[in-house]
Image (cartoon, grey):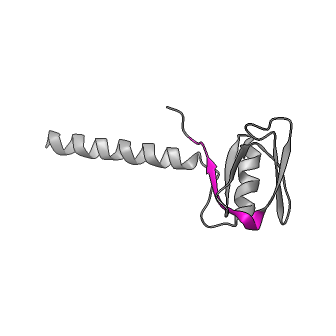
Amino acid sequence: MLRIFWRHLCLLFLLTTVSAAAAESPLNANTTMRDNLVAAMATKKPVTVVLKNGQSYRGPIGSVGNHLVVLNGPAQKEFYDVLVTIDEIVAIEFRVRDQ
């Protein structure tokens, strides 16, 4: 009986941990790429956008328009901004967990 209690307690802990980690991410598969970019911008954390051609840019999002997004000071090009067409973005990488 005690063994079953501990199993249930461990399962509850794992489910709570997983749902808490998922809650930290601003990314949502049920919205548009633009809406995800706006949500990521609100966190002020850097993101990586991956383009259809395989190129990627990492940096904080400066602004999101209807068709374009601005990344401020992307990695390796800190003195530049990058303007990207939202339709060219195939993935957004967003760090939600630390070790």
User: Residue 63, percent across and down?
Assistant: 85, 51
Q: Is residue 58 left or right of residue 99?
A: right
**Which residue is rendered at x = 77% and y = 63% of the image?**
86
Q: What is the magenta range? A: 86-96
Would you place residue 14 above or below residue 65 in this image? above
- Furthest residue in direction top, as rendered: 99
Would you place residue 54 above or below residue 96 in this image? below
- The quadrant the N terminus occupies is top left
* Quadrant of residue 6 within the rendered picture: top left
Q: Is residue 68 left or right of residue 10?
A: right
**Which residue is rendered at x = 85% and y = 45% of the image?**
81
User: Residue 52, percent across and down?
Assistant: 67, 64
Q: How many marks?
A: 0
User: Residue 57, percent across and down?
Assistant: 71, 48
* Quadrant of residue 98 within the rendered picture: top right
Q: Nearer the viewer, residue 76 or 26?
A: 76
**Which residue is rendered at x = 86% and y = 41% of the image?**
80
Q: Nearer the viewer, residue 21 or 57?
A: 57
Magenta stretch encompasses residue 89: yes
* Quadrant of residue 51 within the rendered picture: bottom right
Magenta stretch encompasses residue 76: no
Q: Nearer the viewer, residue 13 or 54?
A: 54
User: Residue 4, percent across and down?
Assistant: 18, 45
Q: Nearer the viewer, residue 12 or 78?
A: 78
